[in-house]
Amino acid sequence: RDYHLARQPARKASVVYVGLCHPDNEVEEISTDGFSQPEEFLERTIILPEARAYRSRDLVRGIVGPTPITVLNYTSSAAAAMLAKLGREMAFDTVQIEGVHLARYIPVVRKFPGRPPIVCDWHDILSELLRRYSENAPSLSRKFYARRTTKLLHGIEKQVLHECDIHTAVSRSDEEKLRSQVPSAVFHVVDNGVDTSYYAEAQ
């Protein structure tokens, strides 16, 4: 989904990809099953330092604080500083974020010169997925933590619905569930699909 959401606009515009990776990890080669490699259509690819996931202090903050662990795992002050620097160096017509786990970077993007509109692509609804997990968690401690995180995620999702200018969802069902939280949110449904022309040519 991410690949094609970048590839299609790149036919008419310059697209910069910004990703997160922990410094100790190597960036894996992306398998595209015969499609063009991302570097062939992206103007620039930038990898920012990601925080180490599930650090002890973040696990505690995920219980007693307002931010769920799923967001803290992706929140890095170093990445935020580098993203802010990128915003000062380049001009953007729009910025798209992939999911609510990147919510803490929205204020950084809001300070970009020209205040480009922000699009949030909702691959799924994390609070709903975690709620389902909490119902079948293997232990009471995990059940409690999952329920607490579900509540916090619901709050973050509502915040993102307010803060982003446009939203894309994978289904009408997801759109309706999210819009019920913030009726004024602007949504477009962009279904997951198959590149039929690619497979037709392969036959």
Image: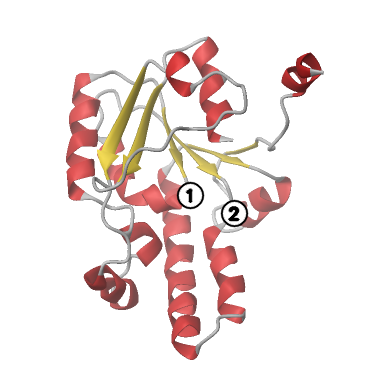
Q: Residue at x 66, y 52 (%)?
A: 174
Q: Kindly report the distance in space between the C-alpha atoms of the residues bearing marks 2 and 1.
A: 8 Å
Reply above or below: 115 against 98: above
Q: Residues within 10 Å of mark 1 (few under 14, many from 20)?
A: many
Q: Residue at x 52, y 9 (%)?
A: 12
| Position in image of residue 77 (x %, y %) | 18, 49
Quick one: 197 or 179, which is closer to the camera? 197
Q: Quadrant of residue 156?
A: bottom left
Residue positioned most to the top: 12
Q: Residue at x 22, y 42 (%)?
A: 80
Q: Check disc 2 and report its element: helix, strand or loop.
A: helix
Q: Is residue 68 visible?
A: no
Quick one: 164 or 12, which is closer to the camera? 12
Q: Residue at x 23, y 42 (%)?
A: 79
Is 158 left, or right, of 108 in this rendering? right
| Position in image of residue 191 (x %, y %) | 69, 37
For the residues bearing labels 2 and 1, Cβ distance under 8 angstroms = yes
* N-term mark: 2 or 1: 1
Reply above or below: 75 against 62: above
Q: Residues within 10 Å of mark 2 (few under 14, many from 20)?
A: many
Q: Quadrant of residue 135?
A: bottom right
